[in-house]
Amino acid sequence: MGQLKIAIEPVTPFRQNCAMIWDDETMHGVVIDPGGDVDQLLETIGTLGLHIDRILLTHGHIDHAGGAARLREELTAREGALVPLWGPDERDRFLLDGLKTTGEGYGITDARPVTPDRWLHEGDAVEIAGHSFEVLHCPGHTPGHIVFIERRLGFGIFGDVLFRGSVGRTDFPYASTADLLTAIRTKLMVLDDRTVFICGHGARSTIGEERRDNPFIGERA
């Protein structure tokens, strides 16, 4: 097993962090949250020489999932075998079904509805670049939001649950501030302080930094 490598590609007008994570020996890996700008993502994947084993979604919002249907098709054609799409939790099905309509509301004309090849649930494990990542259900921002965590590496992909200095939005009709904060406090803030995580937007952070400084859930909250 080689080293785990990460490339972050900001996509869509929302500048969402699409992550590519791979093993630097085998060059096999995953794409997480391809919200759009699929041509850009395909170019980066080709330039890096990656073989994508699967696409993962943390949740069903347009900026995280809007390009998933096309990327699955393009990568499947390139690899000569199905590149499956996994996640999020099925409670986000309504968001994935509505991607085209939602995209049009934001002037994004190429988003398409998508159905995952596999829904993911709390306690599932997903291989990413040769490492087993645990799936945690962290609702609140959306009902079916999940995160991926590898405790031994001290590394996670948190989507729009927890940010550097902030937390996910809960001003949607289906969102819940109480559920979001409960998930963060009971599932994420119990992780080691040295755990590094990629956010859905903006800079990465650590659990320790957010425990100290995050005004929503930190020691000063």
Image: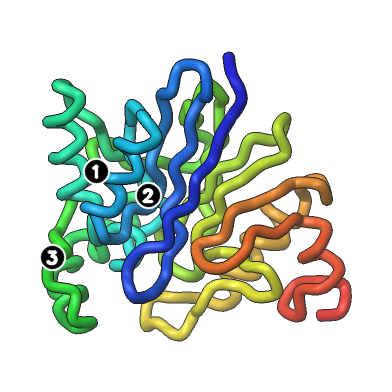
Q: Secondary structure at mark 2?
A: loop
The reply to whether residue 53 is in sight is: no
Q: Percent position (x, y) of residue 133?
A: 56, 33
Q: Is the residue 115 above or below the residue 10 in the image?
A: above
**Residue found 54% across the figure and 43% down from its top:** 148
Give residue 186's quadrant in the image. bottom right
Mark 2–mark 3 Cα distance, whole angstroms, equals: 18 Å
Q: Residue at x 13, y 60 (%)?
A: 112
Seen as rendered, the residue at the extreme top is 1
Q: Position of residue 79 (x, y in %)?
A: 20, 24
What's the residue type where badge 1 is placed?
Pro
Vertical relation: 47 (above or below) 33 = above
Query: What mark, if any, has residue 57 been given in the picture?
Result: 2
In this figure, which residue is indicated by the disc labeled 3? 110
Q: Which residue is mark 1?
A: 116
Q: Is residue 186 visible?
A: yes
